[in-house]
Amino acid sequence: MVPHMKTTIDIATDLYNEVRRVAQEEKVTVKALVEEGLRRTLAEHARRAPFTLRNATFNGDGLQPEFSESSWDQIRNATYDGRGG
């Protein structure tokens, strides 16, 4: 026998009414529809490829000479200088 966990969830009234209507049409319980939806969502989640950050490195000569002694705040401020905000 599969163990079960009893829980309470809050869902929007219109969604619940739609679930009840579909459950009646399909002659199944609301619980069965909720479990089916959760299983489908978990299966879809498992199929998704994990996020991989692309390699955005580049070869360059480093900082421009006028920024060689600057802090990150100074570099950031120069980057946005004249762009509003």
Image (tube, rainbow, N blue to C red):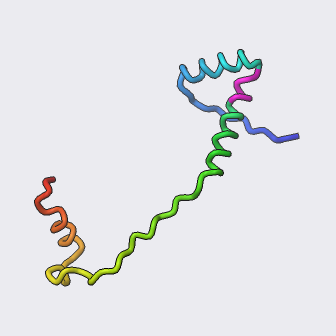
Tell me which secondary structure the magenta stretch mostly adopts.
helix
Farthest residue, direction front: 59
Q: Nearer the viewer, residue 18 or 66?
A: 66
Residue 29: percent from the left, percent from the top? 74, 23
Answer above or below: position of 81 versus 10. Answer: below
> For residue 73, what is the image quadrant?
bottom left
Q: Nearer the viewer, residue 76 or 6?
A: 76
> Is residue 32 part of the magenta span, yes or no?
yes
Residue 51: percent from the left, percent from the top? 52, 59
> Is residue 27 part of the magenta span, yes or no?
no
Answer above or below: position of 65 versus 20. Answer: below
Answer above or below: position of 70 versus 24. Answer: below
> For residue 26, what is the image quadrant?
top right
**Which image quadrant: the N terminus?**
top right
Residue 76: percent from the left, percent from the top? 21, 67
| Rendered residue at 15%/53% (across/down) | 85
Report the span colored magenta: 28-33
